[in-house]
Amino acid sequence: MSRTIEQLRADLDAIDSAIARAELEVRYAERTVKYRSVDEMLKARAHIAGLIAQNTASGRRGASSRYSFTTGRGF
């Protein structure tokens, strides 16, 4: 099941909040996950952040533009 960017960001917020409170249990929308360690949570957080980066980069247009100029002497 593919998750939307908004859902992934909500998951990231939930895991960040749990890490800040030093809790190993995280509630994601309709499910609860109990992690074994903070290290495992950090790995899950990195995975979620990577998914967000991958999905936002693939849908984004390039920041560069191409321009073409023609000059003449006016004769």
Image (cartoon, rainbow, N blue to C red):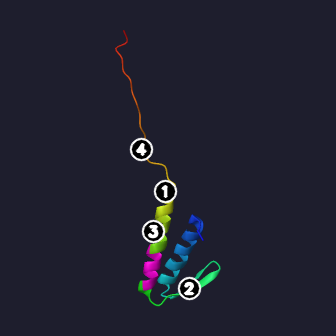
Q: Nearer the viewer, residue 24 or 4?
A: 4
Label 2 sits on residue? 33
Q: Where is 14 relative to 9, above or below?
A: below
What is the magenta segment's predominant secondary structure? helix
Which image quarter is the N terminus in?
A: bottom right
Task: Give the mark, 3 or 1, whose residue is nearer the N terminus.
Answer: 3
Label 3 sits on residue? 50
Start and end of the magenta stretch?
Answer: 40-46
Task: Give the mark, 2 or 4, whose residue is nearer the N terminus.
Answer: 2
Q: Secondary structure at mark 4?
A: loop
Q: Nearer the viewer, mark 1 or mark 4?
A: 1
Q: Give the CA distance from mark 1 to mark 4.
A: 15 Å
Q: Secondary structure at mark 3?
A: helix
Is residue 71 covered in magenta? no
Q: Nearer the viewer, mark 2 or mark 1?
A: 1
Residue placed at 36% from the left, 17% from the top? 72
Residue 35 image point, x, y percent:
50, 88
Label 4 sits on residue? 64
Query: What's the residue type where badge 1 is placed?
Result: Ser
Task: Give the mark, 1 or 4, whose residue is nearer the N terminus.
Answer: 1
Q: Secondary structure at mark 1?
A: helix
Task: Give the mark, 3 or 4, whose residue is nearer the N terminus.
Answer: 3
